[in-house]
Structures are given as C-alpha cells and as structure tokens.
Image: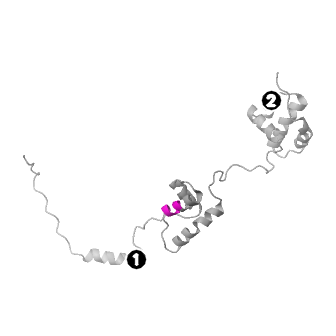
Amino acid sequence: MARTARGAENLEWAREVLAQAQTVEQLRQAQAVVLPLDYGLSMEQTARVIGRSVPWTCRLRNRFLAGEIVGDGQRQSRGGRRRQNMSAEQERELLAPFLERASTGGILVVGQVKAEIEARLGRSMALSSVYNLLHRHGWRKLAPDKRHPQSDPLAQQEWKKNSPKTSPKPARSGPAKARSS
C-alpha cells in the first residue's frame, strides 16, 4: 500500500498556482501536488498523467513544497564558479601589479604569479589553474613573431641578389669504404 501524499497544508496554494500557471512546467508542478492530494493518485499515476518520469515528478513536488515554483526566476541556474579560490575582485587585486608591469613592456612570469597565489591561499595550486585565472582576466601568452618588427624586406632582397655566390660542395665519388678492424 502506498504512503499518503504529504503537503496538504500547501493544497490551496497549489490550486492557485494551477489556475494561474504561465508555463507548462508550472502547470505540471502544481498538478504533481494537487493530483495525489485531491484524487488519491499514486506517484506513478501522477507521473503518467503529467507526462514525466516518477523521479522527476517527485522532484517537482518537493520543490513546490519547499516553496519554489518552476520558472519564477527565483532559483539560480547552474553555472558560475562554485569552487572558486578567490572572488573576482580579489583575483583582480592580486593580478593588478603583474598585469600592470606586463602592459608597460615587462614580462609576466607565470611562476611568480603562481607563487603569489599560493602564498595568499596557503596551499599549492596547479599551474593550469593559474593559466585559467590569467585567461579569465584577459591575459594571453605572447609568442614571438615570424619576423623581427624592425626588419626591412627590401634590404633583405637586395642582400640576396648581391651576395657572393658560394661554390657547391663537390659530390662524393662512389660509395664510402668500410673500415676493417
């Protein structure tokens, strides 16, 4: 025999939400509360009526009974930085001197940034996490250019044209002889 449905104290509120539902999910959530209480449906029957699985129907019911209506904008969506080491402001504060030096022509040494972060946190940190932190704040690793910025392509062409020709190396005649021991 199935348990009796809980949430009778929220039944009037569920009926109001059922009448004023703006989305299909809100309607289903209110039905997940009203159907078992008013009509004595089991969770399996309720799930079949609202077109969701039994676990999802239980989740909708529990969220409603906890005071949360689906789609009302109150619940934060997943995403963001749940396991952050520092807030974004603390990261900016820590990186400010390094990025300032790098913007004026200095070199940003990631090992120094890593040491500073580890000193602040009091524990070690992966190098990839330091690179991710730098990337979050707009830093990118610069690679050398293909050519020197002060090079002169015309002068290079002139040098190639006027440089002395070197004689080719003489070709070997025949196969190399093996030494005998």
Q: Is residue 116 left or right of residue 59?
A: left
Query: From this viewpoint, is residue 148 visible?
Result: yes
Q: Main secondary structure of the magenta part?
A: helix
Residue 1 lies in what quarter of the image?
top right
Q: Nearer the viewer, residue 128 or 46?
A: 128
Q: How many marks?
A: 2
Q: Which residues are magenta?
A: 110-115
Foreground residue among 109 and 44: 109
Q: Residue at (8%, 49%) from the top-left corner?
A: 179
Q: Which residue is mark 1?
A: 150
Asked whether 82 or 143 is in front, the reply is 82
Front tag of 1 and 2: 2
| Mark carried by residue 43 | 2
Q: Give left or right: position of 90 versus 152.
A: right
Q: Secondary structure at mark 2?
A: helix
Mark 1 Cα shell of 10 Å, populated few (<14), some (14-19), many (≥20): few
Horizontally, is 79 left or right of 180 in the view? right
The amino acid on which the numbered mark 2 sits, given as a three-letter code, is Met
Please state the horizontal and vertical placement of residue 158, each as a whole percent of the image.
30, 77
Examine the image and state in which quarter residue 6 appears: top right
- Residue 143 image point, x, y percent: 45, 64
Q: Secondary structure at mark 1?
A: loop
